Amino acid sequence: MFWPVLVHDCLKRSAELSAEKEALICDQRRWTYAELDEACDRLADFLSRIGLGPRQRVAIFLDNSAEAVISIYATLRAAGVFLVVNGSVKARKLEYILRDSGASILVADAAREGLVGEAVKGIEEIATIWVGEASPAPAGLAKRSFSWKEALGASSAAPSLRPRGAHRCIDLDLAALIYTSGSTGEPKGVVSSHLNMVSAARSIIEYLENSREDKILNVLPLSFDYGLYQILMAFMFAGTVVLERSFAFPVRILETIERERITGLPIVPTIAALLLKMDHPGKYDLGSVRYVTNTGGVLPVEHIRKLQGFFHSGKIYSMYGLTECKRVSFLAPGDLEFRPSSVGKPMPNCRVSIIGEDGEEAGPGQVGELVVRGANVMGGYWNAPELSEKTFRRGRYPWETLLYSGDLFKTDQDGFLYFVARKDDQIKTKGERVSPREIENILCELDGVLEAAVIGVEDEILGQAIKCFIVLRPGAQIGEKDIIRHCACNMEPFMVPRHIEFLPRMPCSPHGKIDRGILKRLGAGTKGPGENPPGQRLPRP
């Protein structure tokens, strides 16, 4: 099969070959490839007219929607670079991402006018396209605010600053910045070229055996690379995507699978746990599901077995990946029975090695850091040369980059991969990667909090739940409700701690650092909200 080398050309090619086929079903509207292609062209023209130049960034601050999809492809067609920002972020993180990325255009939901207005204060020369009935213009941005209707209009009064199509991309050009949590506490933008994204998508399509007959149900946010690639991949093979805003209502999702005859369902462990807790799932006809994929955390073996019964006619693919290379490995469904705890072998056009602490390649059963090579390995981190140099290193060829994953793995005698642990302390909750440092920084902003430490604890539904340990300043009167309220106002919902425990002091190592090993042992006795009063004295660690 011929694959275009640019992400946006995949949609164009599918529109030329399958113009009247349904491409996207979202918010009760069905878009054909021809309709979606035309909308992308219109918005791309408008972006060029208001000044989007080659390699300039467009931030898309929208929930899952047709407008978000159109904005992604229109940005690429205008030779720009897109970044999708999770719709639940607060003003402080939105501001950071806008400043760090240097976005010149922001596409945002009109319902978030106040939040956006707070985030863009002091950011000059940023144009805003508002999606929604209203056309608000926050203070200082009135001259650079446009409505979605205006942006998709047949013509625009805005002057065209460059001829349409004056700049053509090549596959080495930057296509996207995918922001993910960083160990420093601030999000980091993964630099993704057209070559990286098309290569990764093509390999996944190959092992999933996708065809134009596939209809994918995507409930994952487009700000999450796993959710984003459901769109990119489907438009490559001219499939159909049913795009939902979330997995908030499992019954509705099962109804959609039955009604739309869904063939592909990407999930994370949280979704699997929720599905398996449902009563009487057998009343829904799920026989159309050809495959279920999982990433964002390793599925418990028992969940895999139950999912096989849940989707009796579908294949279960257990996979491993990270934003820095999209995907690394998959376990073929035929191997699930014999190696249910494995994440399989490298996907097509991807190779891995496991490097021990001595710098040598580890043998079977030995633990080491997973190192990835392939065209899917991204180009580094935006505005973070030191971190990029540590994570992305030169390979055996001058043009090759190796990704040092930071994850510990081992293999068996047959070369199957097994995830052991993360080298850092990042938490995977609800399929999202969360930096403890980021939460700790926000907790310590609350007056009365002296110290804060965050860990992940095992949770059947979330994969890992966030637990925070708090040491209060002398005389401070702060309870769990105060902590939760502060967190809810300053971070996304998935980052809000599920468990809170007050300590008289933090356990420390001989070097004076917080001993997270002790905290993790304390975390095994996790208490729910309201069970641990502020300042309760715990046994000495």
Image (spheres, rainbow, N blue to C red):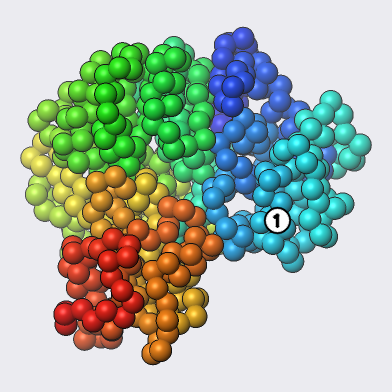
User: Which quadrant is the N terminus positioned in?
Assistant: top left
**Disc 1 element:** helix
User: Which quadrant is the C terminus positioned in?
Assistant: bottom left
Res 354 visible: no
Nearer to us in this view, 11 or 437:
437
> Which residue is label 1 attached to?
114
x, y percentage for residue 97?
59, 58
Res 289 visible: yes
x, y percentage for residue 503?
28, 79
x, y percentage for residue 387?
44, 64
Name, please, the residue furthest toward the bottom: 474
Amino acid type at image mark 1 = Gly
Nearer to us in this view, 261 or 373:
261
The image quadrant that residue 206 belongs to is top left
Left or right: 464 in relation to 49: left
Q: Residue at x 49, y 67 (%)?
A: 486
The local crowd at label 1, few if under 14, some if 14 to 19, many if 20 or more residues have their Cα within 10 Å, is few
Q: Residue at x 23, y 28 (%)?
A: 307
Q: Residue at x 67, y 49 (%)?
A: 112
Q: Residue at x 46, y 53 (%)?
A: 493
x, y percentage for residue 400?
40, 47
The image quadrant that residue 417 belongs to is top left
Nearer to us in this view, 141 or 359:
141
Q: Above or below — where is 290 with respect to 267? A: above
Left or right: 162 in relation to 419: right
Q: Above or below — where is 164 with respect to 420? A: above
For the image shown, how many numbered marks are present on the structure? 1
Q: Above or below — where is 388 with respect to 36? A: below
